[in-house]
Amino acid sequence: MLTTLGIVIGIAAVIAMIAVGEGAKIKLAQSFNNMGTNLLILRSGASHFGGVHGGFGSQPTITLEDLEAIRGLSKVRRASPRPEQPMQLVSESANWRSDVGGVIPDFFDIRIWAVAEGRNISASDVENTTKVLVLGQTTASNLFGPGVDPIGEQVRIANIPFTVIGLLAHRGQSPGGYDLDDNAYVPFTTYVTKLQGGLRNLVNGSSYISATSADDATAAEQQITELLRERHRIAPGMDDDFQIRNMVEAAEAEAEGARTMATLLAALAAVSLLIAGIGIMNIMLVSVTERTREIGLRMAVGARPRQILVHFLAEALGLSLIGGIGGTALGVLGSGWIARLLGWPLYLRLDGIVVSVAMSAAVGLVFGVYPAMRAAALDPIEALRFES
């Protein structure tokens, strides 16, 4: 049991490594889907007043003409303004404070965000400044109750009636813990004329931009930076009056963290299997020494060296397989615990489990060869004379 313990730990680490790695891939894919397609977030500059410096987005500097110019860049697929502010939404029976944003249809394409019920904001809604809105599921649930169909209901924002035309699909939480379903969206023109007031040509908030591909995200960021510096007449050496966040890089950083964890688990598994192999070799050498007379007796009655070799290899293989099976059970349980701890999906691959058990068998064979060869090479007469 003590000999197989190293195998148990090593195989458990291998299975946990595979499960964590696959879970990280799924989590990364979910993060990409929640953020949007090859997403870049453009924010206005920081304000400076009386020695007080505001953060990015506090000083509107991005115009609608800037966004139109950005859409013409070769590495940009779509761009949408998304000014947003927390506002009180009031239904007939309840009220709820949520983030209200003004968008165009491209925003939902960038975010890969479908509607679960009703319809989405259309180009005609933006063109005609209609007073309609789509709700995230958290906001809809708090305004109308869980499971209630909100389509066609009236919601007042800043004492202005809006008609609910759509309920957005569930998105869950962002990596930072923000509820992605706690929001409401109205046509951009409606937001600017009815809710924002003033600054009609300026985007008071963030803009969402989709690069042509994940590989082109960095190139798109560079193109946008050069374009805006030129349009805003920013001299060389001066700071930008805007900020671009490359969410593709953020997602890749998260993936790199997951890969680092998997690498550490792989190192733990390798060390554990090495120690376990040495332990098996040690116990088998002790076994050969203690059973020298037995080996001599078997040889005296006709056992060939090859049969002795196979016998001791089988014992080493048995020890390692017992450890592999125990390690598999521990690895499955440990993977579930790690998944719950990190909030990641659990994904156990059958081929990974098979490979892990095969690895345990390989360790037994590799480290059992020398003791088996030593047993097979004993001289039967000397073995029979051996006194333990």
Image (cartoon, grey):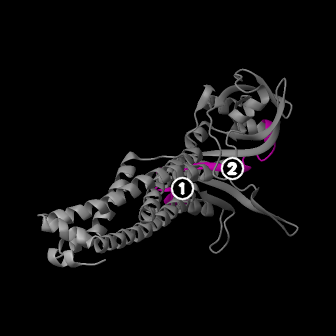
Instruction: State the residue in front, 83 or 116.
Output: 116
What residue sits 22% from the left and 74% below the top?
374
Instruction: State the residue in front, 379 or 137.
Output: 379
What residue sits 18% from the left and 65% below the top?
298
- Disc 1 target residue: 248
Instruction: Using a 10 Å C-alpha cutoff, classify the residue at mark 2 as few (fewer than 14 neighbours), some (14 to 19) or many (20 or more).
Output: few
Quarter of the image holding residue 355?
A: bottom left
Residue 196 counted in the magenta span: yes
Instruction: State the residue in front, 81 or 198.
Output: 81
49 relative position to 129: left or right: right
Instruction: State the residue in front, 310 or 190.
Output: 310
What residue sits 61% from the left and 33% below the top?
169
Give the position of the N terminus as an image quadrant. Answer: bottom left
- Chain-order first, disc 1 or disc 2: 2
Q: Are marks 1 and 2 in contact (CB under 8 Å)?
A: no
Identity, as a three-letter code, of the amino acid under mark 2: Gly
SS for dot 2: loop
Name the mark nearer the viewer: 1 or 2: 2
Instruction: Using a 10 Å C-alpha cutoff, classify the residue at mark 1 as few (fewer than 14 neighbours), some (14 to 19) or many (20 or more).
Output: many
Vertical arrangement, residue 259 with respect to residue 384, above or below: above
What residue sits 35% from the left and 56% below the top?
321
- Disc 2 target residue: 177
Identity, as a three-letter code, of the amino acid under mark 1: Val
Where does residue 52 sit, x and y in percent of width and height? 85, 66
- Segment colored magenta: 194-221
Where does residue 30 sit, x and y in percent of width and height? 54, 46
Give the position of the C terminus as an image quadrant. Answer: bottom left
Marks 1 and 2, how far apart in space?
18 Å
SS for dot 1: helix
Where does residue 276 sit, x and y in percent of width and height? 40, 67
Quarter of the image holding residue 146?
A: top right
- Is residue 72 visible from the viewing direction of this image? no
